[in-house]
Amino acid sequence: MPKRLVVLALLLAPCMPGAAVAVDLHAYWDDRCKECHDDAGAFARRTLRVEDGRLVGAHHREDLGRFLHQHYLADDLVAPVTAMLIAQATTTPLFKSHCAACHGDAAALARKSLVLKDGVLTGKVSGRPVSDFLRTHGGLAPGEIPAMTATLQRVLGEVGAR
């Protein structure tokens, strides 16, 4: 009997609030969507916008969420992918303009080099807060550092880091 309870708990865990399974949204996009739709950030900035808090597309203005459900996107990923696309559609591409030439894409950098320590975005190797490091790295204006730090922290969450 206890084995059945364990199996049942494992099966139900992804359905329980706060028990979401970590999924790398960027890897998912690259594997399932990128071939037709390009990089998620470029796609979002080129074809999507946010109106009244809702993500709308050039072709699917009324119910983009329903379209995503029907367009090769797993049901449990519609909300997180939508949130990722909203963030990308509404965020200035600072990483692309200041960092991509050396670091590739933000998701790869986040996976390899970043971690949250006590809620602070930190370099894995240096142990320094990213916001401090960016003061002397990357050529960002001081006013751009909070936005870059927030973007990298968001991306770290999107790649499934905890």
Image: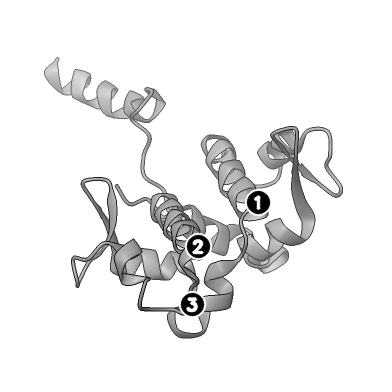
Spot the residue most to the front.
Answer: 142
Q: Position of residue 154 (x, y in %)?
A: 45, 51
Q: Position of residue 17 (x, y in %)?
A: 38, 23
Reading the image, the residue beneath label 2 is 143
Residue at x 52% of width, y 35% of height: 76
Badge 1 vs badge 2, beta-carbon distance below 8 Å: no
Asked if the residue under mark 1 is in contact with the one under mark 3, i.e. CB atoms within 8 Å, the reply is no
Q: Residues within 10 Å of mark 2 (few under 14, many from 20)?
A: few
Query: Front-most of 134 and 101?
Result: 134
Q: How is the image coloured?
A: one colour
- Residue positioned 21% across, 20% down in the render: 4
Give the residue at x 37% y 72%. Answer: 135
Evaluate if marks 3 and 2 touch, with contact meaning CB atoms under 8 Å apart: no
User: Which quarter of the figure is the N terminus placed in?
Assistant: top left
The residue to which callout 3 is attached is 99
Task: Tell me which label, 3 or 2, sits earlier in the chain.
Answer: 3
Q: Is residue 84 left or right of residue 120?
A: right
Q: Which residue is mark 1?
A: 90
Query: Hey, what amino acid is under mark 3?
Result: Cys
